[in-house]
Amino acid sequence: MALNFSNGIKPNIGQNIAFGAVKNFFSPSQIRLEKGEAEYAVAEGEYVYIGQPLTKGVSPVFSGISGNVSFAENGDIVVTNDFKLRTTDRLVRADKPLSEYTYEELMQLIEYHGVRDTRDGRMLCEILSSCHTPQRLIINCTETDFMSTPVAQYITENLTPLIGGAKILSKLLGVNKLIFVCTENSEELIGLLKKTFGESHAFVIAVIKAKYPIVPQTIYSVLYYKQIPRGKSCEEMGYPIISAESVMQTYTSLVTGIPQVYKLMSVCGEMADKKMNLYIPIGTDISELFAIAGIKVKEGAVAVSGSVYSGEVLKNAAKVSCTTSQVMALKASYKKPEKCIRCGECINACPMLLNVQKYALSNEAHRSGRKYYKYSDICIYCGCCEYVCPSNIPLTDIIRRENALREEGSDK
Amino acid sequence: MKSEKLPRPPFRHSYKTSSYRSLCLLIAMLPVTLWGIYLFGARVITLMIFGLIGGISADILICFILSRFDIKKAIRRTKLLDDCVISLMVTLMLPASVPFYLPIYCAFFAIFLFRELVGSRGNNLLDPAFAGIMLTELVFAGYMGSFVLPFSYHNSLSLIIGKDHIAAAECMSPLQLLIKSNALYEDGIPGMFLGIAPGKIGEVGIIMLIAAAVFLAVMGISRHYAGMTYVAVLFAFCVIFPKGESESSFYALAHILSGSTIFIAVFGCSNPATTPRTFKAQLVFGALLALMTYILRSVFVTFDGAYLALLLLNLMAPYIDELFAGVPYGVILKKRKGAANE
C-alpha cells in the first residue's frame, strides 16, 4: 500500500538528488575519539581491533580501525591505523533469535552498541522508558537536503538491515504500523519496498515530493495534514520519526555485533573537484578526509559540516562524528549584507511558514530595543531564507541571536 | 550591521541578488524601449539619456549628502543599476513629445523623493517610478496628456521642438478616446495589440511588454500573479459593466490594451517592495487594483486612473499582506483550537 501526497515542502530547490554509489570504506591514518566521562579501557601503546571498546561503561566508545593507541590523555583517545582491518573476536552480538530477547536485554544491546549516542537513539530510549506507546513508527528514508548523504541509494543497496531493523524496533516499541517515507525520485527503493512488503497493511510506503528540507516536522505535516503544536515534538504527538540510517545501525549492531563505528557521509562542495559518498570510521580527521577520498580541493576553500544551509565551519582539529552527514569544501567568500529590500523571497522560502522578513527588518530594530518576533523558536535553521535572500542578510544568525536573547530573558 | 561580526556558517547564496533583479528588469525593458524608438523616433533615445542623467544625479546627490559630502563614498554608495531601472521606467511612461527637461525632473524626483526620502530603497511606501510620474502628471498635466502619431519621427538631436511640429502630429491616445468619448481607436484592437498607436513611449508595445513579462517569469523575478489577476479582473469588470455603444468585449479589450494597463501589470505589480508577497495577497491586490482602476477610469473619468490606483494599492499592500499572512507551523490558531476542542 503506497500513499502519494500532492502537497510538497517548500522551497522547490532540493529536487534531483543525484549521487553515485556509496564507496564502502575509506581507512584513515588515525582516528581521534572523545571518551567523555567514561574511564579508559585501554592504555597508550596497546593494540586495539575494530569494534573493541576503548572505554568502560554501558555505552562505550569503540575503535573503527585496528592499530596501536598512540595517545590516551585529557579525554582523547588517538588510534594509529595499521591498515590491517582486524576485527575483534569479542564482539557482543545477539546469540539467540531476536524474538526470544526480553525488552530489557534488547535495550541493553542497543545502548551498548552506541545507537543511543545519536538523536534517534536517545529518542527511542525516551519512548521506551515512557509509558506512552506509539501506534506507528515512521522511518525516514529520505535525504534531508539535496547535498546530504544519499540515504535512499544506500538503502537500495542494503535493504536487509533496514527491514530487519524496522522489525526489531516495531517489536520493541509495540507499534502495529511501520511507515517508510521515501521521496518520489527514489523509484528503485520504492519498487523494492513494495516488492518486499506486498499488500501488507502493517507496512505503508509514503511517497513525498523531493523538496528541501525534509525534517520531522514537515514529514508529519505532509503525512497527516496537521501541524505539530508549538513546543511539542513528533514523538510527543505519538508519531516517532526515526532515520533509516539509525534503523540499519540497530540491526547491524545486534546481528553482526559491530557497533556504530562507521558513518555514512558525503564529501562534496563547489570547491572540490568531485563528489563522493563514503562509509568512514568515526573519529577521522576532517583535514584528512578529502585527501584519503582522493578529492582535490581548490585554494581558499573552507570545510563545512552539516547541511549546506545551516552547517558549521570545521576547524582543522574537527573530526567525523556520529552526526556528521556531509563535509563540503565551499568558497570562503563573504558577501556584505545589504539593507532588506522587502522582496519577500524569504517568506516564500520558509518551510515553517515564518514571516522571516520581520527578522531582517528587526535587525536594525534591535538597537531600539523593539520586541522580538514571537515565533522565532519555531525556526529549524534550515537556512532556506538566507540562501534566497538577495541582500545577503544573515537571517539564520539573526534568528539564533533572537532565540538566545529570548532564552536569556526567560531565565531572568 | 551587528551581525557582520558573527561567524557565518553557510557560504552559499542564491545568484538572485538585488543587482541580478535590477539587471533582469533592465533587460526586460529593452524590447519595449526599442519599440518606442522605432515608433516615435530617435528622440526617445535623447529622452532616455536625460532621464538617466536625472536619476543618477539624484542618487549621487543624496549619497553625497548622506556620506557627509565625501564624493568618493558617495559614488561607492550609489545604486547605479537600480537608478537606471527607475529612470528608464519613468521615461517609458512619458509621451514622446515632452520637453527634454521633463525626464530629468521626473527621474530626479522619483529617486530623490520617492525612493530615498520616503522610506529608502526597498522600504518605499509608493513605487518610486509611478509616484514620480504621478507628480509629473500633477505639475505638467498639459505635456503628459499630449500624444503624437506613431512614425512622426522627431529629430533626436534638437533640444527644442517647435510647437508647430508637435501640433502637426498631435492626436488623442486610444485611452483618451475611450475615457472621454467612450469610442474605440480607429485602427481598432489589432492596431493596439501590435503596438502601432499613439501613447506613452513604453506603454504601446503590448507584444514587447508580454515578452518582458515572460522574460521576468523565466528569470524568476516575478510570477505575475498580481499582474495577471489585475488584467483578468479588469477585463471582467469592463465586460460586465461596459460603457458606450461598442461591443462589451471590444470595450474590455480596449481597456486592457490601451494606456498603462499592461505596463502596470508587468512592471508595477512586480515591485516586491510595494506589492504583497504571498500568493493569496497578490491575487487580492490584483483584483483590488482592477476594481480601483475601473472606478477611477469609468466613474471619475480619470485618464491616469491606473497609476493612481496602483499608488493607492501600494499604500494598502502591507495590510493586505498582514491579512493573508500564513500561520507558522506549530502555531494553531485559537479559533481552530476551540473548534477542535468542541
Image: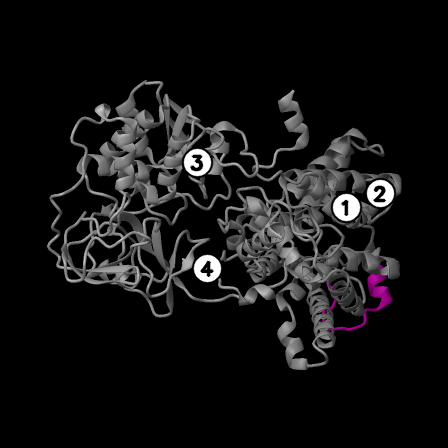
Query: In the rendered view of the protein, which quadrant contains the C terminus of chain B?
Result: top right
**Secondary structure of the residue carrying numbered label 1:** helix
Query: In the rendered view of the protein, which quadrant contains the N terminus of chain B?
Result: bottom right
State whether residue B248 is above or below residue A368: above
- Residue A337: in sight, yes or no? no
**Secondary structure of the residue carrying numbered label 4:** loop
Q: Nearer the viewer, residue B209 or A90?
A: A90
Query: Mark 2 highlights which residue?
Result: B296
- Give amino acid for label 2: Leu
| Residue A279 falls left or right of residue A409 | left
The main secondary structure of the magenta stretch is loop
Q: Earlier in the sequence, mark 2 or mark 1?
A: 2
In 3D space, how far apart are the residues under numbered discs 3 and 4 (Cα atoms)?
Answer: 27 Å
Query: Mark 4 highlights which residue?
Result: B9
**Secondary structure of the residue carrying numbered label 2:** helix
User: Which residues lie in the magenta part?
Assistant: B153-168
**Secondary structure of the residue carrying numbered label 3:** loop
Query: Mark 3 highlights which residue?
Result: A209
Magenta run includes residue A98:
no
In 3D space, how far apart are the residues under numbered discs 3 and 1 (Cα atoms)?
Answer: 36 Å
User: Which of label 2 and label 1 is nearer to you?
Assistant: 1
